[in-house]
Image (cartoon, rainbow, N blue to C red):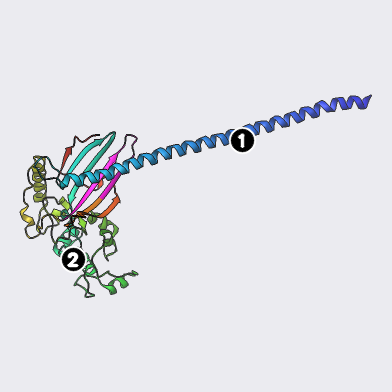
Amino acid sequence: MANAATLRTARPRSMRGQRGIALVLVLWLTILLTVIASGFAFSMRSEAIAARNAISLAQARAAADGAVERTLFELSRPQVPGTTWVADGTLHVWNDGDIEIRAVAVNEAAKIDLNFANDALLKGLLATAGGLDIQAAARVGDAIMDWRDADDLRRPNGAEEPEYRAANLKYGPANAPFETVGELSRVLGVTPDLYARVAPSLTVYSRQTGIDPMVASRDVLLALPGTMPELVDDYVARRRQAIEQGLAAPPFPPAQGFTTGSAPALRIHAETSLPDGVTFAREAVVRRSPDARRPLIVLEWAEAARMSAVVAPTAISSSLYKR
């Protein structure tokens, strides 16, 4: 009788323990499933956001590419003062649906050509925009000339192969024209800070010995020998006023001897903004060609920085072009 009573008492206790273990297992399983479900939901949400961002970025990129093409079209139309677009730095703003588009075109003669400009213009830029003293500007200027010329003869303040070896560099001057402005950063004496200061005023596409002062930036105008800041500021203000009134930009007397007029290459910067905050900027350099079968040759086509960092528009024109 005692054994039977003991068994009856032990069985309920054992069953209660098993039910407790099962409850704990169910709770842990519920937590595990909740974590898995939450992770899956978060992953799906992240993928949905990424997909929306990818679509928005594709729209912004396509709109920017279209803005470049529209700018080229507008620039190719017969010139009518006050109505047609000119590659003079004027900023054009319009909307394509709910996409805001900003585009600006500037002739590459607004910049100093690394391969064709004389040493006076280059050294002037190194001294004014680059912040170098006269001696340092002479050294770097001669080093640039030694980099782009075809010989191994060192200029008085320049640098050829021995100077690069003495500086523990594993390369020497190319002794060939610069292929890109970025190549300037390899020239002996060109620091990252100096490069950042002067690069926006340089080009390898104009193929001009001088500049076009009617579209040149303030930094480029200041590089002209003997030019004073107050003269440049006054001229830039008068030039902006003339452009806003639809008039031709006035001449700049200090640029005599360095004026070459327009170049066949144009730089176009287009930037688009979507309502969700996605933006995209495209920069292209295009050269006109006498070949009717290929009237335009694309020299550069790249994603760019925001407009405020790369251009200083002389005027703003709000286009009514909408779709």
Label number found at residue 99: none
Give the position of the C terminus as an image quadrant.
Answer: top left
- Identify which residue is drawn at 19% across, 42% down: 91
Furthest residue in direction front, as rendered: 293
Q: Quadrant of the N terminus?
A: top right
Q: Which residues are magenta?
A: 264-283
245 displayed left or right of 151: left
User: Circle 2 sits on which residue?
Assistant: 138
Magenta stretch, main secondary structure class: strand
* Residue annotated with mark 1: 32
Q: As drawn, is 161 to the left or to the right of 253?
A: right
Q: Would you say residue 162 sits in the magenta stretch?
A: no
Crowding at dot 2, Cα within 10 Å, few <14 / some 14-19 / many 20+, comes out as: many
Residue 312 appears anywhere in the view: no
- The three-letter code of the residue at mark 1 reads Leu
Local SS, label 1: helix
* Circles 1 and 2 in contact, beta carbons < 8 Å: no
Q: Nearer the viewer, mark 1 or mark 2?
A: 1
* Image: 171 above or below 4: below
Residue 97 visible in the displayed image: yes
